Image (spheres, grey):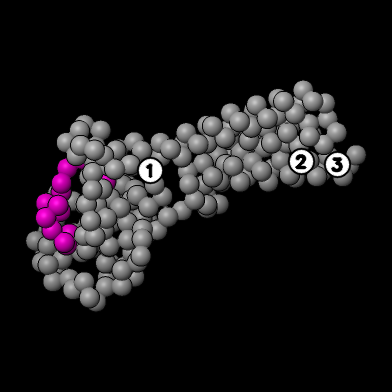
Amino acid sequence: MTLRRLLTLPALLGSLCAGGAFVTVLFGAFGGPSWLLVIGLTLSALVLALLGDVAEKSPDGAVALGLRSGGPRAHAPALVRGVRAVDRETGRVAGDARAQESVFAFDLVVVPEDRPAYRVEVRHPLDLQDLLHQDRAVVEYDPKQPWRVVVPDNPPGEWRARARRLDPDTVSVPDAPRRGLPPGSQVLVLGVLIAAAVFALVRGIG
């Protein structure tokens, strides 16, 4: 969870709504009328259901984002740890790799020149660079935001040669892709903090 994510308008509005629902539960549970508790529990259930739906439909925190339009980019060799077909919406393993809802998920270890190697998952509907049958690849990434990674269809020959020369034994491979908190968790956390602060303030004044 980052400060930038917390300060976006949707996150703030969602956190205020969640905080309102949670603080209603608190006032209803501690000395308030029973109808207030019922309303608070109902609203909280709706908030949690919505956040759960967001988490279910959002890509995993380890999935790379695309490159920014006009943003900086650079090539780097990468090790291919595995390739699987997943559902484009849920990220779950797909039963049929040829289904329209399926995409390839490339588990890659990016090896830039100016930073430690890191592991990330890149998704694309096509088997780019024939990675189903390769153990090395060339990626294009954003040097300022290295979690933005794509697999170009036709990378420069120089970088293809560098990828072929990449020795896996010299690369420190992370155990798993870097993962953040589930999508929507920042709204839930901030909502709880808002509810606790409002409840404590009102109780302190009263």
Residue 129 visible in the shown view: no
Between the residue at mark 1 and the residue at mark 3, the CA separation in whole angstroms equals: 40 Å
Q: Position of residue 44 (x, y in %)?
A: 64, 32
| CB atoms of marks 1 and 3 within 8 Å | no
Which mark, by number, is residue 59?
1
Across and down, in percent, residue 159 comes to: 14, 63
Find residue 203 and name its label.
3
Q: Earlier in the sequence, mark 3 or mark 2?
A: 2
Outermost residue, front direction?
Answer: 95
Q: Which residues are magenta?
A: 123-137
Marks 1 and 2: in contact by CB < 8 Å? no
User: 169 left or right of 59?
Assistant: left
Question: Around disc 2, counting alpha carbons within 10 Å, would you say few (fewer than 14), some (14 to 19), or many (20 or more)?
Answer: some
- Position above or below: 126 against 144: above
Which numbered disc flags the more N-terminal residue, 1 or 3? 1
Amino acid on which disc 3 is placed:
Arg
- Callout 3 crowding tier (Cα within 10 Å): few <14, some 14–19, many ≥20: few
> In the image, what residue type sits under mark 2?
Val
Spot the residue most to the right. Answer: 206
Q: Looking at the image, tell me whether mark 2 or mark 1 is earlier in sequence order.
A: 1
Q: Splitting the image into 4 quarters, where does residue 125 fall?
A: top left
Mark-to-mark CA distance, 3 and 2: 8 Å
- Answer left or right for 184 relative to 177: right
Secondary element type, mark 2: helix
Q: Where is mark 2, residue-wise?
A: 198
Name the side, left or right, on which 81 lies relative to 42.
Answer: left
Residue in the picture at 14% in, 52% down: 132
Number of other residues with Cα within 10 Å of mark 1, as a class: few under 14, some 14 to 19, many 20 or more: some
Label 1 is placed on what type of residue?
A: Pro
